[in-house]
Image: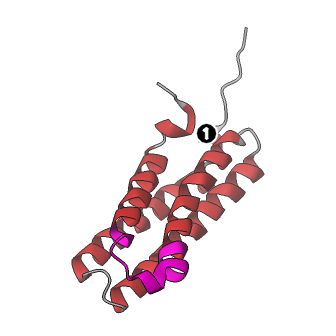
Amino acid sequence: MYGGFRDLKVFNMAYELAMRIFDLSRSFPAEEKYALTDQIRRSSRSVCANIAEGYRKRQYEAAFCSRMSDADAEATETQVWLQFALDCKYLDAAMHKEMTEHYIEVGRMLGGMIAHPEKFKPKVNQS
C-alpha cells in the first residue's frame, strides 16, 4: 500500500523488534525510566528511522551507505542495552538470546545493503 522503505524486510524486522522492546521495557523498574528504558527504546527506534532516511537518499550511494551504517551502529547499541537488561535481571536468558539473534540478523542485512547499494538505486525511466 505505501511502498518504499516499508517494503524492506530489514525495516519490518527492525520495526517489529523496536515494538517488542517497547513492550518488554514496560516491565523495567521505574528508576530505569530515564536510563536503560529510554536508551534501549531510543536506539531500537533509531534503527528504523535510519533505514527509512537512508532509503530515501538511495540515489546517492554514499548517503545511503552512511545511513545504513548508522542503522547498524544503532542495532549494535541496542544489543549492548539488551545485555545490560539481562545482567540486571530485567530480561531472561531466552528472551535476550532471541532478541540478540534477531539484531545480529538485522546487522547482516544492513551489511549486505552497504556492500551492494546499487541494488537499491531508484530505477530511471527510459522513455
Residue 19 in sight from this viewpoint: yes
Residue 74 vs residue 87, the one in the foreground? 87
Secondary structure that dominates the magenta span? helix
Residue at the limit of the structure toward the front, as seen here: 30
Q: Which residue is mark 1?
A: 120
Residue at coordinates 67% horizontally, 48% vertically from top-left? 54
Type of the residue with mark 1: Phe
Residue at coordinates 77% horizontally, 43% vertically from top-left? 60
Give the quadrant of residue 57: top right
Q: Secondary structure at mark 1?
A: helix
> Within 10 angstroms of label 1, few (less than 14), some, or many (20 or more) residues?
some
Residue 125 lies left or right of residue 51; in this view the side is right
Q: Which residues are magenta?
A: 24-38
Residue 101 falls inside the magenta stretch = no
Residue 65 vs residue 94, the one in the foreground? 94
Residue 80 in sight from this viewpoint: no
